[in-house]
Image (cartoon, rainbow, N blue to C red):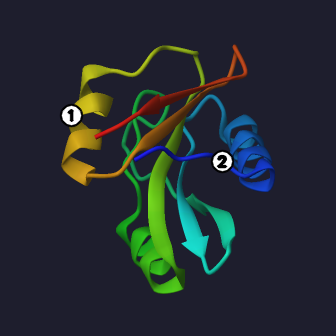
Amino acid sequence: MAVTLAPASKLDAEAHAREVAPWEACGLLVQVGAEQKYLRCRNLCEKPEQHFVLDPRDYLRATLSGTIVAIIHSHPEGQDASELDRKACQQSKLPWLIYQLPQDKWLTINN
C-alpha cells in the first residue's frame, strides 16, 4: 500500500525528529475521516539514539482516534533502513516511513 504524507503531517513529523534528535522520533500516521494526522509517540527504547519502541498507550490512542495507515520514525544519523526495520515492518503489516534527518530525505518500506 502506497502512503503519501500530507504536507502538514510531513512538517509535524520532521519537526518532531529535529526536536528529539539525537534520539529516534517515532509516531503514527492516522487517517481521521478525510484528515490525515501525525501522532507523536513516546520512544520507550533503552537506547533511543539507536532504535525505537513505540509506547503501546500511544498506539491505542491512535487506534481509538482513527485508522493507522503508517508507522513513522527518524534516523537522526541518516542511515538507511536496517534489517530490523524491514522485519518489523513486515510484522506490523503497515508501511514504514523513515525520515533521514541529515539528508532531509524520506524512505518508505512496504510490508
Quarter of the image for residue 89 reads top left
Residue 25 horizontal/vertical position (percent): 57, 43
Of residues 6 and 92, which is closer to you in this image? 6
User: Residue at 79% across / 48% down in the picture?
Assistant: 7
How far across and how far down the image is residue 64, in percent?
Answer: 46, 85
Task: Please name the residue that numbered disc 2 is placed on.
Answer: 5
Residue 30 at x, y = what percent? 55, 66
Q: Which of these two is toward me, 7 or 18?
A: 7
- Which residue appears at 67% of the width and 39% of the height? 17
Q: Position of residue 84 (x, y in %)?
A: 25, 29
* Residue at point 26%, 52% (across, down): 92
Q: Secondary structure at mark 1?
A: helix
Earlier sequence position, callout 1 versus callout 2 = 2
Q: Which mark is residue 58?
A: none
Q: Nearer the viewer, mark 1 or mark 2?
A: 2
Q: What amino acid type should be assigned to the residue bearing mark 2?
A: Leu
In the figure, is residue 40 to the left or right of 66?
Answer: right
Q: CA distance from mark 1 to mark 2?
A: 22 Å
From the viewer's perspective, is residue 107 above or below residue 8? Answer: above
Residue identified by numbered label 1: 87
Q: Amino acid at mark 1?
A: Lys
Residue appearing at x 40%, y 77% in the figure: 60
